[in-house]
Amino acid sequence: MSGDLITAVAMSEPAVGSDLSGISTKAVRDGNDYVINGQKTFITNGINADLIFLAVKTDPKAILAHKGISMILIEGDTPGF
């Protein structure tokens, strides 16, 4: 841990706050990649982050609302981020 990277955790969303069972940001697999669509709010260090831990729905058909949620790591310079 050199401290060279700034990280952030992106979980909160405009309509549901920090209730992860209600998030709507989705990650859909596309070959070896994921296409991610959604919004996040209140991301501490978000503007300066080199690496973001992003909470997303990867299984929107999960029976229990808190299932089907994953954390995906996004580099801060990813196009479209």
Image: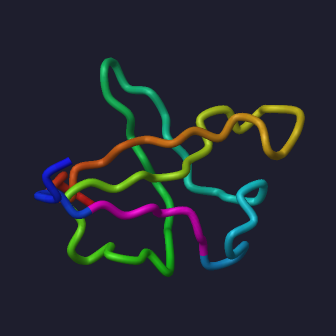
Q: Could you tell me residue 38's position as x and y percent?
A: 50, 60
At x 32% / y 28%, what residue is drawn?
Answer: 33
The span shown in magenta is 7-13
| Residue 22 sits in quarter | bottom right
Determine which quarter of the picture holds residue 6. Answer: bottom left
Of residues 30 and 42, the one drawn nearer to the viewer in this rendering: 42
Does 20 appear in magenta?
Answer: no
Query: Does 32 appear above or below 5?
Result: above
Q: Residue furthest right?
A: 63
Q: Indicate the position of residue 25 as horizontal and vertical percent values.
A: 56, 55
Q: Is residue 60 above or below residue 76?
A: above
Residue at point 13% right, 52% down? 2
* Residue at point 47%, 63% (across, down): 10
Question: Looking at the image, how many numbered discs can be counted on the residues?
Answer: 0
Which quadrant would the C terminus be assigned to in this image? bottom left
Image coords of residue 42 (percent x, y): 49, 81
Q: Nearer the viewer, residue 43 or 64?
A: 43
Question: Residue at point 60% right, 71% down?
Answer: 13
Nearer the observer, 40 or 42: 42
